[in-house]
Image (tube, grey):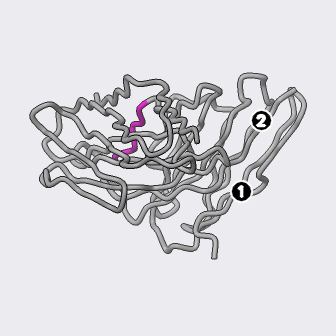
Amino acid sequence: DTAVSQTPKYLVTQMGNDKSIKCEQNLGHDTMYWYKQDSKKFLKIMFSYNNKELIINETVPNRFSPKSPDKAHLNLHINSLELGDSAVYFCASSPRVKGDTQYFGPGTRLTVL
Amino acid sequence: AQKVTQAQTEISVVEKEDVTLDCVYETRDTTYYLFWYKQPPSGELVFLIRRNSFDEQNEISGRYSWNFQKSTSSFNFTITASQVVDSAVYFCALSEALSGYSTLTFGKGTMLLVSP
């Protein structure tokens, strides 16, 4: 049973396109996150949702829009993709917000050509 | 603001050697949590350990051990008798618990290469 799953695992697209990445967790957690890992392996928080409510929104271009239809799902939509968006995007979830262990999905490698 | 420093970018060892990965953190909170994650070549992020700021006991799990020292703001990770399967990037991370909603702040990672 996969705890945190993401689809697709790989995404190759052209500049200017719009794409979505889906994330689902079956752990019953209240909080979900999106992280970006750049080519140097640096991991940085992008967004966090707690019970479908956006609670953290780091300095991310507004081309990125997260959506949480329910607390088990957190999707990431990216408009007008740019070369610099190429990265690995990780979804994660945790039981509550403060200090709980975050469990990560397998990652989605996005390549913008 | 919180910060995590992993000064070792890459470490190479030969199998069966012991290796220690360093992690130094900065935080203004008195309540915080420290984590280690492993990222093998397959790319997933695997949780290894979580420690809260009030528990300075060292922890051992098989070949893995962690040394938490508040006096030096360090949370170092030692692998005893390393194996090829330990080859991965290891991330130390910090989560503050009191200052509003908290997120994980990651260090830049240490790549460990274990050769046969």
Residue B49 appears left or right of A92: left
Instruction: Specify which label sits upstream in the sequence, 1 or 2.
Output: 1
Q: How many marks?
A: 2
Residue B21 vertical placement versus B35 (above, below): above
Tell me the amino acid under the disc marked 2.
Asn
Question: What chain does mark 2 sit on?
Answer: A
Name the chief secondary structure element in magenta: loop
Q: Position of residue A26 (x, y in %)?
A: 57, 73
Where is residue A77, by image quadrant?
top right
Q: Which quadrant of the figure contains the N terminus of chain B?
A: top left
Extent of the magenta region = B102-107
Q: Position of residue B38 (x, y in %)?
A: 49, 47
Asked which secondary structure carries label 2, the reply is loop
Rendered image: mark on residue A22? 1
Tell me the amino acid under the disc marked 1.
Lys
- Residue located beneath label 2 in the image: A79
Q: Residue at x 13, y 42 (%)?
A: B30
Asked if residue B50 lies in the magenta stretch, the reply is: no
Asked which secondary structure carries label 1, the reply is strand
Judge if badges 1 and 2 mark residues of a common chain. yes
